[in-house]
Every structure is written in C-alpha cells, then in structure tokens.
Image (spheres, rainbow, N blue to C red):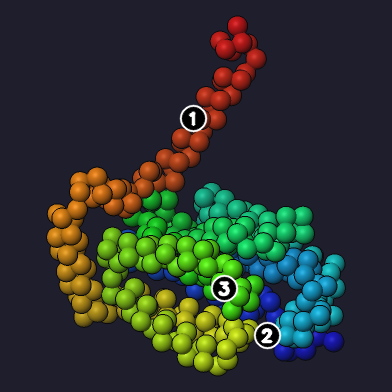
Amino acid sequence: MVKLKNILYNSVTVSLPKNIIQFFLGFVLYWLVFGSFDVFTLGIALAGFLLAYSAVYFFNDVIDYEEDKRDEDKRGWKLVACGILTKRGACILGCSFALAGLILSSLVNGWFLGIMLTLLFLNFLHSSPYTKLKRRVIPTTINMTAIEFLKYSIGWFAFTGDLLRFPFWIIMTFSLVYTGIYLIYKFRFRGNMIRDNKLLLGSIAFLTALSYALSVTLYPFALPLIILLAASVVLIMLSMGVGRKFRFMNWLWIEFVILPLVIIAFLLLSVPFVDQANAELTETIGEYKETVYKKLPDDVVTGLENLSKPAYESLDDVQEDVINITVNLSTLTAPGSSTNK
C-alpha cells in the first residue's frame, strides 16, 4: 500500500532539490552575465529538464532492483525495491516522464533538447547492465563528470548558445567536486580503497584546484567562489563529524545544505554592496594576475590566456562546422564523386 512517506520520500523526490539547484547554477550565471531573462522560457526549461531527468531514477530502480532490495537503507526510499512499484510500472512511469520532458524541452530550443537527449544517453551508459559503467571506477569518473557538467550548464543553454562568455571553468569545478563526492559515496572510498585509488583521487583533486583557480582569476565572480570554498570546508567537516563513514545521511546533508549555498552565494551579487566588494576583489586579482604574467615566459602566458578562449563563439558555430564536415565527407564518399573516377 502506497503511503504518504513513499510519495514524499523516494529516488525521484530525494534528487529533485539537487537537480533544481544544478539547473539554477547555469541559469543564475546567465542572468548575472546578461542581466535579463524570459520567465516563460525559464519555466518550460526547468519543467522539461526535471521531468525528463526524473526518468533516469525510475529506470535505475528497475536495473538495481536485486541489489537495492538487499540494502536495508535503500529499501526505505526505492519504490521498486520495497514493493510499492512493480518493474513494469516503473518503466511506464519512466517512459512517460521522459516523453513529457523531451516534448517540453523541444519547445525551448534545439540545443536544449540535444543536451537532454545526451544526458539520458549518458545515464543509460552509466546504469545499463550491458555497459556496467557504474561498476568501474575510471569509466564512472569520466561519464559522471560529463553528466554533471551538462546538468550544471543546461540552465545557461536554455537561453543562449554563447560560448565566449560561458563560464566553462566554474561549471567544470562543480562537476569535478560532485564526481569526487559521488565516487566516495558510491565506492565507499576509505582506508585501503583511498590508497589504491590515490592517483585517480589525486588527479581529480588537482584538476578541481586548477579549475577553481582559473574560475577565480578568469571570471568576475571571485567573492562568491571564495565564500563557497570557505563555507563548504566548514560544512563538510561538520558533516563528516556525524560518523567516520560516509553514510547516506552525509550525502543528504551535502545535497540539502551545501548545494543551496551555491545559488545563494552567486545571488548575493544582486546586493549592491556585495557586488561592489566583488568588483573590487576581482580588480585586485586582475592586477596581481598581470604582475605574475609579466614574470612568466611568453609561451606560458599565451597558454594560460588560451584557457579562457573557447574554440567557438557560439553553439551555432559548432553546428555550422559539423554540417560542413558532414557535407564534405558525404561528397568524398558519394558514388560518382571525383575520388571514385
């Protein structure tokens, strides 16, 4: 019998706040850069994303049924594992959510729909018993980082295809942090597990630090990023103090407490004196950067500057190049072409 607890507390609803915040990071960054947005587009894009992505959890519950029903914790919030929902019912709900979400996504723009389709495909690779990506650490790391990067940036691409002002390194920072935390939670990294995977975890830590440093120096959001770093360190220490093991409740702590800080920190820039303080801090960092650049070799400076310059100005340029390459390839391989004479 379905209870109110099952409706409020399940794999879809538990992940809903996290997905909303991830969508809003891209949106808030877009709003801060461009200064305005269309409310109708925001509503349609958010609804399309949440509906389509919720399908992932239904299918994941079906695939992980045997494993979940043996886990006392997961039986409390996995509807298929606890017997509230049949596998067939979960598949029907998943397909319904995906279809409704994709229809709404198609009303936003073509790139938004494309990102949603890519997200569903990458999640299929992650959970599918045929690929078994989530059973392997390295494939999970790569795939999860790609999934989170798209989720954190989809709010941006709901409104624009602009790549010149797209905060790539900020999105990458959050994606790497999320992936690192997911690996600790999913694979229960501790003790020998950490030592056995120290190269991987060290690489993630290094790339995260690098992308964070680039985010602070390249974009006009230095103050929110510094606030987030300080607050996250304090909150994670408090969270880990609950127990030595990284338990499910620690994951919820991060989802419901730390993730909202991401949006709050950036929204603080709408307060005039905070915006002024951020502008002054950004200017100071820029001056220090220029001083450091003067002491570095020209090749190093050029390389650092290229990190902030995307290969394309917009997604439309990407599409144009893809079309041109496709046309050229079809011309070369077409029967009767000059290469076949």
Amino acid type at mark 1: Asn
Query: Tag 1's secondary structure?
Result: helix
Q: Quadrant of the C terminus?
A: top right
Sort mark 3 into few (<14), some (14-19) or many (20+) by Cα contacts within 10 Å: some
Residue at horizontal 47 percent and vertical 84 percent from the top: 236
* Disc 3 target residue: 194
Q: Earlier in the sequence, mark 3 or mark 1?
A: 3
Residue 183: image quadrant is: bottom right
Amino acid type at mark 3: Ile
The answer to which of 172 and 265 lies nearer the viewer is: 172
* Disc 1 target residue: 324
Query: Tag 2's secondary structure?
Result: helix
Residue 208: image quadrant is: bottom left
Q: Earlier in the sequence, mark 2 or mark 1?
A: 2
User: Which mark, residue 8?
Assistant: 2
Query: Tag 3's secondary structure?
Result: helix
**Picture coordinates of residue 210, whole percent (x, y):** 37, 63
Rounded to the nearest angstrom, the CA distance separating label 2 from label 3 is: 35 Å
Residue at horizontal 15 percent and vertical 55 percent from the top: 295
Question: Is 301 displayed left or right of 129 in the figure?
Answer: left
Residue 196 can be seen in this image: yes
Residue at horizontal 42 percent and vertical 81 percent from the top: 232
